[in-house]
Image (tube, coloured by chain):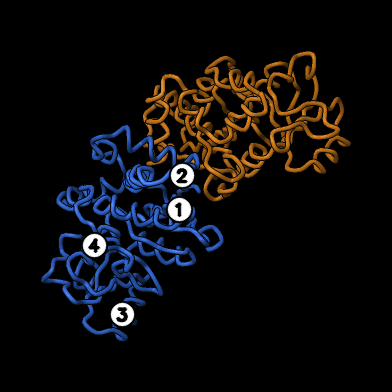
Chain colours: A blue, B orange
């Protein structure tokens, strides 16, 4: 069995992911938001591509919270931005969160042909890695990237996940998987690598340092969200 | 001005490379072959996609040598394989080399919309870097990759080129460019990284260790091949 990495959401194709366990990563910040929301009691997170689709989906659901971003900032008329720190128990307990973001939601929906689509970030690195290796299949870590480009923050997170997966089972690594692992293992201080990332600087300029610090806490949460039939809920398999 | 990296030949599009200086890298082994052939006196190298195209092109040219590989091995009826060590002065002086390889020739021909298309490898790292920065434009390093996949050997070579480019001029680096630079700068012994690469192992299994050792000699040759109107010759600009 092998582990491969796809570097941007737009590169994902159904043929590629079919039969595999996919872990989608958008550490800054969509998958960190999803993990936090479900940990704090959201009933579900529904990832959608556009603001229009978000508003249409709202009509079909009850107890809705609208969340997401465009250009890293809150969307007009929405309840919450893409900051995980806003997804508190008070804000989203028992709610259905409809989420639209620039990069992460595309990567998730494009991965839907996979055997399983798990949601990963540093926050749940070990938990999601353990869940992915339960399937005796190839694993693909799908990086959301930033505006269709490779993103250093997702890449080092991928290395962290692969590091944890290899503790569980031996896998063959593709060249890109091996390189992400090297990047992770050579940066005990993850931020020292990520602080040079374009996307990190964008968020820093928006004074979102608290988000950055939050998202880079490895293994803070033990939940594993799973995308199935258009909806993300906590994985049923997790004990 | 910025430096970006495209990770496989198939991802190159005319829109992306238009107006930029492209350096195409297929360190194992197509661009190492091209650099060696032109250094040793070949009149030109004509990169083509298929064996059929190679045979058709042969009819239009004089003094032809057919070179290339499929599955890393010599093509039936061809004069030379894809081993740079075969492209000696005796074998190719004053000849037109028609070259077809699995990865490198695709990356070169797909880059043709760029302002300049230079041919790079470790063998000419500093020379090609200096030539690329002469243009006051963005630079894109196009990795050929291996069978449409990211290849560690091209990636660390890219880091070496960027390392040399930054000695000449300041450039903004994309996340992927920065990561290749990190990989290069953290491996003083390049082979220690590349020995884990899939493609490296393929060549090792074919007992092509001499090729590997040759291709990983940085700055052995000071020539800069350039692709223009379908043909690769030594760059006229180089003093």
Say whether disc 1 or disc 2 marks the residue closer to the N-terminus. Answer: 1
For residue A31, side relative to residue B224 (left or right)? left
Whether discs 3 and 2 lie on one chain: the answer is yes
Give the x, y percent position of residue B185.
38, 25
Residue closer to the observer: B27 or A128:
A128
Quadrant (top left/top right/bottom left/bottom right) for the C terminus of chain B: top right
Q: Chain of mark 3?
A: A
Is the residue marked by circle 3 packed among few (<14), some (14-19), or many (20+) residues within 10 Å? some
Say whether disc 3 or disc 1 marks the residue closer to the N-terminus. Answer: 3
The alpha-carbon separation of the residues under discs 1 and 2 comes to 9 Å
Whether discs 4 and 2 lie on one chain: the answer is yes
Give the x, y percent position of residue B76.
83, 34
From the viewer's perspective, is residue A47 above or below residue A174? below
**In the rendering, which numbered label is found on residue A55?**
3
Which is in the foreground here, disc 4 or disc 2? 2
The alpha-carbon separation of the residues under discs 4 and 2 comes to 34 Å
* Circle 1: element type: strand
Tell me the residue at 30%/59% (across/down).
Answer: A31
The alpha-carbon separation of the residues under discs 3 and 2 comes to 42 Å
- The answer to whether residue B168 is visible is yes
Q: Which residue is mark 4?
A: A82
């Amino acid at each position: 069995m092998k582990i491969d990495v796809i570097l941007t959401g737009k590169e994902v194709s159904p043929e590629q992911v079919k039969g595999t366990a996919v872990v989608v990563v958008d550490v800054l910040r969509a998958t960190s938001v999803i993990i936090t929301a479900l940990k704090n009691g959201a009933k579900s997170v529904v990832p959608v591509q556009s603001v229009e689709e978000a508003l249409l989906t709202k009509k079909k659901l009850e107890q809705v919270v609208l969340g997401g971003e465009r250009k890293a900032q809150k969307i007009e008329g929405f309840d919450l931005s893409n900051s995980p720190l806003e997804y508190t128990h008070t804000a989203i307990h028992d709610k259905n969160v409809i989420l639209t973001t620039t990069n992460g939601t595309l990567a998730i929906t494009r991965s839907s042909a996979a055997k399983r689509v798990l949601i990963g970030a540093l926050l749940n690195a070990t938990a999601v890695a353990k869940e992915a290796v339960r399937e005796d299949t190839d694993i693909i870590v799908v990086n959301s990237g930033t505006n269709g480009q490779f993103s250093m923050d997702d890449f080092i997170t991928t290395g962290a996940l692969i590091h944890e997966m290899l503790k569980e089972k031996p896998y063959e690594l593709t060249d890109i998987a091996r390189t992400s692992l090297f990047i992770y293992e050579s940066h005990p201080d993850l931020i020292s690598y990520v602080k040079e990332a374009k996307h990190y600087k964008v968020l820093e300029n928006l004074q979102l340092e608290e988000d950055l610090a939050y998202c880079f806490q490895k293994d803070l949460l033990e939940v594993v969200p799973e995308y199935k039939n258009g909806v993300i809920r906590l994985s049923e398999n997790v004990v």
